[in-house]
Image (spheres, rainbow, N blue to C red):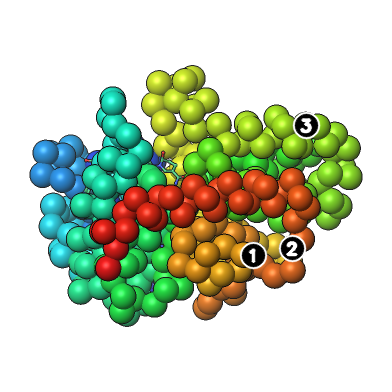
Amino acid sequence: MPEPSSAPVHVTVTGAAGQVAYATLFRIAAGEMLGPDTPVVLRLLEVEPAMDALEGVAMELQDGAFPLLADVVTTSSAETAFEGTSWALLLGASPRTAGMERGDLLTANAGLFAPQGRAIAAGAAADVRVLVVGNPCNTNCLIAASHAPDVPRDRWFAMTRLDENRAKAQLAHRAGVSVAQVTNTAIWGNHSATQYPDAAHALIGGRPAPEVIADDAWLDGEFVSVVQQRGAAIVAARGKSSAGSAASGVIDSVRSIAEGTPEGDWTSLGVISGGEYGVPEGLVFSYPVESDGRGWKVAEGLKHDAAAQRRLDATIEELVKEREGVADLLK
Ligand code: NAX
């Protein structure tokens, strides 16, 4: 195989000894995320107690003998981790422990995402883009971005692509078609049980999903709740949260941002709202996003009926409350 010719792209992964990282790192090293011609340097951040485990991951990455993997940096310093990075994948987060209220979880994570935001602002590459996966990912993204005011607002993303992929898979299964036939599936709002998986605008083989599936009760009921509750269902079945499918969500998100979305289609991403669709400005809200690889915009002109608007209002309300809960921690 010829030597990759271009300069390596630095990719930071936090929570790098965690299970989502374990399912993601080898795919990045294999070129699935940035393509077969782009060498990468992986910059892996963990907390001090997880450094031994992280060394094991680094050894395995070495043993993969990936031609595109130019170097692996392991560190417990955010400054080192984000130095020169073009893609910051924030997978690490404080887990919710027994008896912890959602507010406590938000505060615990603020203590982690504020310094990471500052380190990104201080040391990342000029083209840095940040994808927050660690939960609660929308509000964690908001916190990190608020501590990095000089990093343009359109570089911050929270991951809802896994939810979109789940929704597509449900629609494909129900319609008895390949998932490749399902497009224009949007996740609106928070990556939580209030999210609105939108089948109304989805297309199956180019036709409206409600027309193809012809079962509004299923679309308004089971479809929405299965997607909203899928994370919990995986935990119940597997005893661990979704890691393999989350890794696919990470790879798909980055590729959609970097390579662009197909003509007429979009990807779901939490972005810093500019007020589109009546969402309060500044919330990190998941929208259908169209990318051309250089920039992106929220898909325009989608209409919501009253029931859909109620779902949107519920997820907006939850995100507003989350933002209020961390107001003291925002810059
Ligand atoms: P794990 O608990 O396996 O891994 C998390 C890792 O983060 C741990 O190794 C921990 O040491 C590390 N960490 C904690 N604080 C850190 C810090 N300050 N700096 C660097 N590393 C730190 O969790 P895993 O299953 O990998 O999930 C990672 C996160 O993704 C969780 O917050 C989870 O809730 C979230 N998820 C979000 C998804 C999404 O669609 N947005 C789906 C997958 C996943 O559940």
Amino acid under disc 1: Tyr
Amino acid under disc 3: Trp
Give the mark nearest the N terminus, 2 or 1.
1
Give the mark nearest the N terminus, 3 or 2.
3
What label sits on residue 143 in the rendered view? none
Of residues 180 and 35, the one nearer the viewer is 180
Q: Nearer the viewer, mark 2 or mark 1?
A: 1
Measuring from the top left, give residue 127's x and y in whole percent: 37, 77
Kindly report the distance in space between the C-alpha atoms of the residues bearing marks 1 and 3.
26 Å
> Which residue is rendered at x = 55% and y = 31% of the image?
229
What label sits on residue 277 in the rendered view? 1
The reply to whether the residue tagged 3 has its Cβ within 8 angstroms of ligand 1 is no
Amino acid under disc 2: Leu
Image quarter of the C terminus: bottom left
What label sits on residue 218 in the rendered view? 3
The reply to whether the residue tagged 1 has its Cβ within 8 angstroms of ligand 1 is no
The answer to the question of whether label 2 and label 1 lie on touching residues, with beta carbons closer than 8 A, is yes
Kindly report the distance in space between the C-alpha atoms of the residues bearing marks 3 and 2.
22 Å
> Which residue is rendered at x = 13% and y = 52% of the image?
76
Q: Give the secondary structure at mark 2.
A: loop
> Which residue is rendered at x = 46% and y = 42% of the image?
246
Q: Is residue 275 above or below residue 218?
A: below
Of residues 157 and 221, the one nearer the viewer is 221
**Horizontal relation, residue 69 to residue 263: left or right:** left
Q: Is residue 203 above or below residue 273?
A: above
The answer to the question of whether label 3 and label 2 lie on touching residues, with beta carbons closer than 8 A, is no
Q: Nearer the viewer, mark 1 or mark 3?
A: 1
Residue that carries the numbered disc 2 in the rendered image: 302
Q: For the residue carrying disc 1, how many other residues have a C-alpha within 10 Å: few (<14), some (14-19), or many (20+)?
A: some
Measuring from the top left, give residue 134's x and y in whole percent: 35, 47
Q: Give the secondary structure at mark 3.
A: helix
Give the mark nearest the N terminus, 1 or 3.
3
